[in-house]
Image (cartoon, helix red, strand yellow):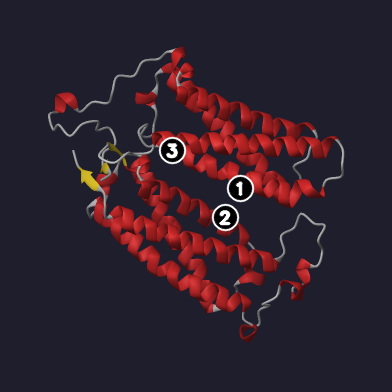
Amino acid sequence: MPVTVTRTTVTTTTTSSSVLGSPSILASPRALTQPLGLLRLVQLLSTCVAFSLVASVNAWTGFAGHWCMFAWCFCFAVTLIIIIVELGGLQARFPLSWRNFPITYACYAALFCLTASVIYPTIYAQFLSHGRSRDHAIAATFFSCVACVAYATEVAWTRARPGEITGYMATVPGLLKVVETFVACVIFAFISEPSLLYNNKPALNWCVAVYAICFILAAVAILLNLCDCTNVLPIPFPTFLSGLALLSVLFYASAMVLWPLYQFDERHGAYPERWKDASCRNSNSFYVCYWDRRLAVTILTAINLLAYVADLVYSARLVFVRV
């Protein structure tokens, strides 16, 4: 059974204060020759090559291009910071919990690069004319996929194993929190035009409230672990997590019913078929039409509902050790 702790500096179940310190941290260039260090070099180089290829031909205009460029640059910058911290042995001085931060970031980075690897070729690159710009875009997509695999590999290598005492973010529920917040952010991007997607419909306004409330609660859980301050809650942290997961499952279940009902049912003034939406008739465009946005939100709602259900199930299997 997975074991996690509410204070992420713990490396043993011994309660004596003399042995509760973090493992010794040594600064050495040899950190880069270890498997995890080599993997981070792959992450650094692949994201650097991806945004460099795109920037060299200015092939990142529009929302899709800007998002992908941001994802690659962000991942490159944070990976560089992690490498510098580990080379300098600065983990103890890092403002966030080092037992939780690297795996949390790696999971986010894998999702960032995954979305960039999907969005960039499908929404942007395919509309580029044949030539140098298109070739660079294809190569950038390849390196984005390499980065995604590298970050996912780090998550697989460093996640908690059954019976291991580790930080909460390395457990399955912790990683699911990352997925839940990331998916919610993508949902917010798709519903960024309220006047055409959910205004004047109380049921759809409720769905948006569900996405916002669940996102905030999950983000709070992540921040409490990253800042190593889970003991500031007025209730036990395991109780907070269980209540959060249960509440989110109920909320998302209601959104899973209401959102597609009011977005695709003709009785509520919606379009059940894509061709009826006038905004979808221009096929050669970087713009995502409203029917596609509604469908994307429906799919993402289902994904997050499944994530919260799994979160609820796995949370019941954790044992918390407080120090």
Residue 104 visible in image:
yes
Q: Measured along the vertical axis of the image, is residue 100 above or below residue 306?
A: above
The answer to which quarter of the image holds residue 60 is top right
Q: Measured along the vertical axis of the image, is residue 305 above or below residue 152?
A: below
Q: Measured along the vertical axis of the image, is residue 202 above or below residue 9?
A: below
Categorize mark 2 by other alpha carbons within 10 Å: few (<14), some (14-19), many (20+).
some
Looking at the image, which residue sits at the far left?
Answer: 16
Taking the spot 48% from the left edge, 23% from the top edge, the residue there is 37
Determine whether, in the image, residue 119 is placed left or right of residue 153: right
N-terminal of the two: label 3 or label 2? Answer: 3
Q: Which residue is identified by label 3?
A: 156
For the residue marked with disc 3, what is the amino acid?
Ala
N-terminal of the two: label 2 or label 1? Answer: 1
Categorize mark 3 by other alpha carbons within 10 Å: few (<14), some (14-19), many (20+).
some
For the residue marked with disc 2, what is the amino acid?
Val
Q: Position of residue 41 (x, y in %)?
A: 55, 24
Determine whether, in the image, residue 122 is placed left or right of residue 162: right
For the residue marked with disc 1, what is the amino acid?
Thr
Instruction: Kindly indicate whether the residue at mark 1 contacts the one at mark 2 (C-beta within 8 angstroms).
Output: yes
Taking the spot 58% from the left edge, 64% from the top edge, the residue there is 297
Observer-side mark, 3 or 2, equals 3
Q: Measured along the vertical axis of the image, is residue 106 above or below residue 257?
A: above
Real-space Cα separation, disc 2 to disc 1, in angstroms? 9 Å
Taking the spot 65% from the left edge, 48% from the top edge, the residue there is 118
Observer-side mark, 2 or 1, equals 1
Is label 1 in a helix, a strand or a loop? Answer: helix
Is label 2 in a helix, a strand or a loop? Answer: helix
Taking the spot 35% from the left edge, 65% from the top edge, the residue there is 247
Q: Which residue is identified by label 1?
A: 115
Q: Which residue is identified by label 2?
A: 186
Real-space Cα separation, disc 1 to disc 3, in angstroms? 19 Å
Determine whether, in the image, residue 47 is placed left or right of residue 286: left
